[in-house]
Amino acid sequence: MKLTKRRGAFVATALSAALVLSACGGGDDEGGDGGSASGGGEFSIYIGDPENPLIPGNTTETEGGQVVDTLWTGLVTYDHETSEATFDGVAESIESDDQTTWTVTLKDGWTFHDGTPVNAESFVNAWNWNAYSPNAAGNSYFFANIEGYDELQAEEGGTPAADAMSGLTVVDDLTFEVKLSAPYAQWPTTVGYTAFFPLPEAFFDDPEAFGSQPIGNGPFQAEEPFIEGQGITLTKFEDYAGEDEAQADAVRYVVYTELNTAYTDLQGGTLDIVDTLPPDAIASAEGEFGDRYIETAQGDITSLGFPTYDERFADPNVRKAFSMAIDRQSISDAIFNGTRTPATSYVSPVVDGYRDDACEACELDVDEANRLLDEAGFDRTQPVDLWFNAGGGHEEWMQAVGNQIRTNLGVEYQLRGDLQFAEYLPLQDAQGMTGPFRSGWIMDYPVMENFLGPLYSTAALPPAGSNVTFYSNPEFDAALEAGNSAASIDEAITAYQEAEDILLEDFPAAPLFYRLNQGAHSERVSNVIINAFGRIDAAAVTVND
Amino acid sequence: MGRFVARRLLLTIPVLIGATFLIFAMVYALPGDPIRALAGDRPLAPAVQAQLADEFNLNDPLWLQYVKYVGDLVQGDFGTDFSGRPVSDTIEQRLPVTAKLALAAVIFEAVIGLIAGILAGIRRGSWFDNLVLVSTTLIVSVPVFVLGFIAQYVLGLKFGWFPTSGIGDGWYSYVLPGLVLASLSLAYVARLTRTSLAENLRQDYVRTARAKGLKPSVVIGKHTLRNSLIPVVTFIGADIGALMGGAIVTESIFNIPGLGRAVYDAVLRQEGAVVVGIVTLFVFFYIFFNLVVDVLYALLDPRIRYD
């Protein structure tokens, strides 16, 4: 017993890196360019074990998200190349005069897998269920900007005042109105996300059964329940109303607890698609798989956040100095095998409005960094703490960051990476970071605002939001607001870029990297597309034999 | 014998109560806020966090949480994990898998281990004996995950003799993982049997038996092997419990959806109900197989009596 236990504990640390790597994320995609006309056949895709039942409102991570996205088609879909929202989904149009009240018109003829129609109520009821706090839906916060959301949130120990958001009104079978609590020009782009998928009547009768065998409106349907720890096989939905119907007859999602095992199966030919590769395989995979190796830019950003509440880091010039002392490219090459792109902005290159020269302080400039640090009177004799969460594989690169700070600025560093998420996150929320910290963000939907508002606005301060640098600037908030209420997407982006400029001046965090995602597939399948959310377009995949 | 078994079974009750409380307290003692960690960098809506904390009694003191848990438990309710999936479903789904894997491992452990140990013990100093010594030393010194990856790569991927992962091929899927899981214990069993047998073969009564002109098979089979097996049976019995609970590494490498990995993940997520439910099951198996071992003693060695 003792020996066995020790073996377990020993390997547990080795496994945890892979575990955490495969267990976070968010995003969505459907649709596709379609391959050859006929198709047929069955293929398999790797997933990790979904943490939650397969209910759109409760699917917060990539694993379940991939399955849910295959089963549903949202109001809008996202283009694979540009990540822009397109009206290839259920919505005919989403229009507004004031960016606050949106009229959603649905296409006629869409049905769920059980044959019931997809109508305005399917959306409104689903959204109300998701937002109603006693249902404890993980994606509840996506509806926070709809009028009446607050009335659906229970006070401590009580029940909410209402069970339907006052901002949602069904006009007729194919039309509903959404009133936001504040203008948001990019709102139509957000509604392609998993959280906004419609739900059929059957869901409300028995959410639990639905969670293991969901009924969606997408290109594939579930004819059998999901088996925990094993997976699910989805079959082509013949009555699919969308344009990009499934090319294959069936897709089999196989649950793996170890990414390495999935990779071995891919090499052995028993698995067809792996959408993420084990870190130690990345270097050799490109040569091994050739054109069956897929690399896609991800809609995410890794930053070094600064505790703006800490006296030592209260001066923006100190923060810029630290940023200028970091050679991002060499860390990417040495630690990540070149799978990270040095960040040049607070937003990801996959969204509209990204500027590749936005961040001057993201360039390595040791002399300027030292000058700024001297000017600010920074005490170099005291070491700085570098914080990150344990078990996420962050130690190596954080150490590299530390070494560069030591070499380039002459400041000693101390790694503080012992805390798991369960302790690390509450500490962040409680202003407990005593030095720069690792901060990761994966976009919810491909809009510029998603990289700014949720991370740096005053409204997003903990505990409600993720503004863990505790940065707060009314000018920044105002610029965001201007973007949200702009009459067109272009005007909105101009305003968001102004907001980003303010951020670049105040520098609450140092943008570090954008991730490139690596995947690979077997010779049996073609037309494998992995989008900026890290999701595979299962409908587009064709089986060769 | 019946009374002995009954007494031992009754004793499991306080042990199980103690075990559940200890495990419960340990999960409770883990630092941090599991609900906050659920969604990672992006926090859940505050009302949702409050709802979940309330649902799982996370704001109550330890004793109250435990009382509520046991209260549900005696009504047959094992509780749910944070996503609302009943723990009993998890167990129902994964226990057969774990049991099959453990059974495969025990069969390998007992059959190969015993045969190797007996042959080596009888012919001490022979080339076979040396082979067993060298190979078991090798197995014991290589960590099981290295062994697992090598077996998977060579036998599964390169030669294609076995499925590389999963349980899609029925019992055949369990052969390679079972062998890997059994490897360490198998080596111990072989060595234990060899030593025990060799030692007993030097006893006076064996010489007497031989002098009486008994056939070698009777001398070894009846007079030596039976009592030589006592330490081996003790080891195997205790090992079954360990094989069921400690297969995390093997389960992960071969992607076997068993209980080990489920409980490992649950510990990381601080899902008290899942950890307590499954580990209690492990404790129960451990006790049960120890009881079986004790009963077997009496069968193996006539000198041992329980009543």
Image (cartoon, coloured by chain):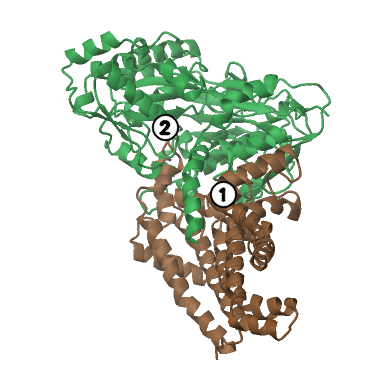
**Quadrant position of residue B21:** bottom left
Chain to which mark 2 belongs: A
Chain B, which colour?
brown
**Label 1 amino acid?**
Val
> Mark 2, residues whose alpha carbon is within 10 Å: few (<14), some, or many (≥20)?
some
Image side of residue A77 versus residue A339, left or right: right
Point out the frontmost of discs 1 and 2: 1
Task: Using the image, determine if residue A200 lies above or below residue A1.
Answer: above
**Quadrant position of residue B236:** bottom right
Chain to which mark 1 belongs: B
The residue located at (55%, 28%) in the rendering is A191
The residue located at (57%, 40%) in the rendering is A126
- Residue B144 numbered tag: 1
Query: Where's residue B296, x and y in %?
Result: 61, 79
Query: Where's residue A237, x and y in %?
Result: 76, 36
Task: Using the image, determine if residue A432 lies above or below residue A89.
Answer: below
The residue located at (40%, 57%) in the rendering is B27
Chain A, which colour?
green
**Label 2 amino acid?**
His
Residue A121 visible (yes or no): no
Query: Where's residue B183, x and y in %?
Result: 61, 55
